[in-house]
Image: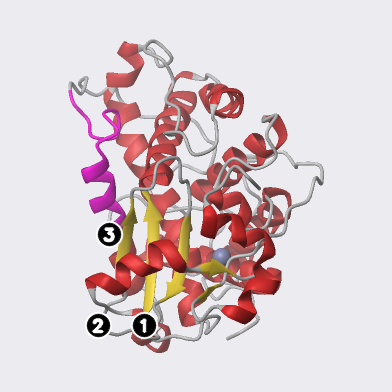
C-alpha cells in the first residue's frame, strides 16, 4: 500500500476509515487474483439482432471487429495522438453531459449539474464519485486516466485497422515500467508506426473508442450518484470544497454497489449510443478498460500501481458483468436487466 498517496492508501482500510470521515466514496477496494477471462471477444452473440434499435448502422463496428472502410487522408495532427490533456479533459466533460442527457428523468434530475473535477495528481489513474463535506455530489477523473484512455484508443484503433497487437504491447509496457507516484509512463517514439498513427481510418476509430471508454468510466461513477450509493445530492460546489474532495476523501467498500454501477453505466452508454447520430457506442470501451487493468494487475511485479485498482473490483469480476449486461440490453430491446438499487 506504500505505493499510493495518503488518502488513497487509506482506501485499503476503507471499512474502518468510513467510520471517521464524512465524505465516503462508493468504489470498492476488493482485489482478487482470479484467472482473467479472455477480454474483448468478437463477435458478441445477440449484437446483430438488436430488437428495438435494429442492426448497428454502417460505421458502428462490433466490438473487436476490424474497421472496414475506404482509405482516408492522413491526419497530420490529432489531439488523441498528441495526448492533449486539455482536449481530453474537455472530451470527458462532453461525454458526461451526453450520458446525463440520456438518463431517465428521475436519475437525470439527481445528477444534473454535478461537476466533473480534473485531478492532476502525478501518477494517479482513477475516476471516482464523491461527496463534499457540505453534502454535495461531485465526480473526478484524473489526467493519468485520460492519458491511459488515449493510448488505449490509439492502440486498439491500430489493432483493428492493421491487424496488430498494440493493446497487449501497451499493457505489458505499462506493467513493466510504471512506478508508483511517478508520471504515467508513455511508450517510446516508434512504439506506434508513424504512418499508421496518421492513418485517417485509424484516427477516426480512436475517437469512437476514446468516447465509449470515457463513457463507461464516467457512466459508472454517475451511477453511484443516481442509484443513491452516496449520502449527497447535486448542488452548488465551491472551489475550496473541490480542493478538499481531491485531498480528503476515502473510498468505501461495497462490491454490490460497484457491480450495480457497472450495469447501470453500461445501460447508460448503450442507450446514449443507440440514440446518437453517427457512431453508436458499444461496451467495447468498457472491455478495453478491463483489459488494461486486468493485464496490468497480472503482469506488474508491483501489487497495486493505480488508484483505480484500489477503488474498483478486479477486472475478472467486472468483465462478465459488463458482457452480460450489454447482451441483455440488446436482447430486451434496450430495457436491460433490473439493477439492484433502483
Ligand atoms: Zn465504483
User: Vertical placement of 87 versus 15: above or below?
Assistant: above
User: Vertical placement of 107 versus 80: above or below?
Assistant: below
User: Vertical placement of 52 versus 230: above or below?
Assistant: above
Residue at figure coordinates x 31%, y 62% from the top left:
117
- The disc, 2 or 3, on the residue closer to the chain's N-terminal end is 3
Side (left or right) of 188 relative to 289: left
Side (left or right) of 101 relative to 144: left
Which quarter is ligand 1 in?
A: bottom right
Q: Is residue 79 magenta?
A: yes
Tell me the residue that label 1 is attached to.
136
| Label 3 residue SS | helix
Image quadrant in which the C terminus is located: bottom right
Q: Residues within 10 Å of mark 3 (few under 14, many from 20)?
A: some
| Cβ atoms at labels 2 and 1 below 8 Å apart | yes
Spatial separation of the CA atoms under disc 2 and disc 1 = 7 Å
Can you see residue 257? Answer: yes
Residue at figure coordinates x 52%, y 60% from the top left:
7
- The disc, 3 or 1, on the residue closer to the chain's N-terminal end is 3
Q: Residues within 10 Å of mark 1 (few under 14, many from 20)?
A: many
**Where residue 153 sits: x, y (%)?**
42, 36
Q: Residues within 10 Å of mark 2 (few under 14, many from 20)?
A: few
Q: Which residues are magenta?
A: 77-95
| Cβ atoms at labels 3 and 1 below 8 Å apart | no
**Where residue 201 sits: x, y (%)?**
32, 28
Tell me the residue that label 2 is attached to.
236
| Label 2 residue SS | loop
**Where residue 339 sits: x, y (%)?**
63, 78
Q: Which mark is residue 93?
A: 3
Answer yes or no: disc 1 within 8 Å of ligand 1. no
Q: Nearer the viewer, residue 317 or 326?
A: 317
Amino acid at each position: 500500500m506504500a505505493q499510493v498517496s495518503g488518502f488513497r492508501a487509506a482506501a485499503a482500510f476503507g471499512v474502518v476509515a468510513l467510520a471517521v470521515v464524512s465524505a465516503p466514496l462508493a468504489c470498492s477496494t476488493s482485489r482478487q487474483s482470479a484467472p482473467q477471462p479472455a477480454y474483448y471477444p468478437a463477435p458478441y452473440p445477440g449484437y446483430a439482432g438488436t430488437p428495438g434499435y435494429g442492426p448497428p448502422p454502417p460505421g458502428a463496428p462490433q466490438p473487436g471487429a476490424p474497421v472496414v472502410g475506404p482509405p482516408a487522408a492522413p491526419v497530420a495532427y490529432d489531439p488523441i495522438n498528441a495526448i492533449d490533456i486539455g482536449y481530453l479533459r474537455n472530451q470527458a466533460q462532453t461525454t458526461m453531459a451526453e450520458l446525463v442527457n440520456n438518463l431517465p428523468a428521475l436519475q437525470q434530475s439527481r445528477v444534473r449539474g454535478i461537476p466533473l473535477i480534473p485531478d492532476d495528481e502525478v501518477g494517479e489513474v482513477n475516476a471516482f464519485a464523491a461527496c463534499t463535506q457540505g453534502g454535495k455530489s461531485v465526480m473526478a477523473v484524473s489526467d493519468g486516466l485520460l492519458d491511459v484512455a488515449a493510448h488505449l484508443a490509439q492502440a486498439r484503433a491500430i489493432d483493428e485497422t492493421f491487424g496488430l497487437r498494440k493493446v497487449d504491447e501497451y499493457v505489458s509496457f505499462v506493467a513493466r515500467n510504471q512506478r508508483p507516484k511517478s508520471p504515467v509512463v508513455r511508450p517510446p517514439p516508434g512504439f506506434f508506426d508513424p504512418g499508421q498513427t496518421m492513418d485517417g481510418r485509424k484516427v477516426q476509430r480512436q475517437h469512437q473508442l476514446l468516447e465509449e471508454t470515457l463513457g463507461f468510466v464516467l457512466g459508472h461513477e454517475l451511477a453511484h450518484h443516481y442509484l443513491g450509493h452516496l449520502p449527497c445530492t447535486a448542488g452548488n460546489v465551491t472551489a475550496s470544497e473541490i480542493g478538499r474532495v481531491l485531498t480528503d476523501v476515502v473510498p468505501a467498500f461495497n462490491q454490490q454497489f460497484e457491480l450495480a454501477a457497472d450495469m447501470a453505466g453500461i445501460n447508460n452508454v448503450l442507450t446514449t449510443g443507440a440514440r446518437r447520430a453517427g457512431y453508436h457506442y458499444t461496451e467495447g470501451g468498457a472491455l478495453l478498460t478491463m483489459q488494461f487493468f486486468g493485464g496490468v494487475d497480472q503482469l506488474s511485479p508491483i501489487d497495486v500501481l493505480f488508484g483505480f485498482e484500489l477503488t474498483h473490483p478486479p477486472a475478472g469480476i467486472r468483465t462478465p458483468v459488463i458482457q452480460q449486461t450489454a447482451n441483455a440490453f440488446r436482447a430486451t430491446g434496450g430495457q436491460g436487466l433490473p439493477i439492484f438499487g433502483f
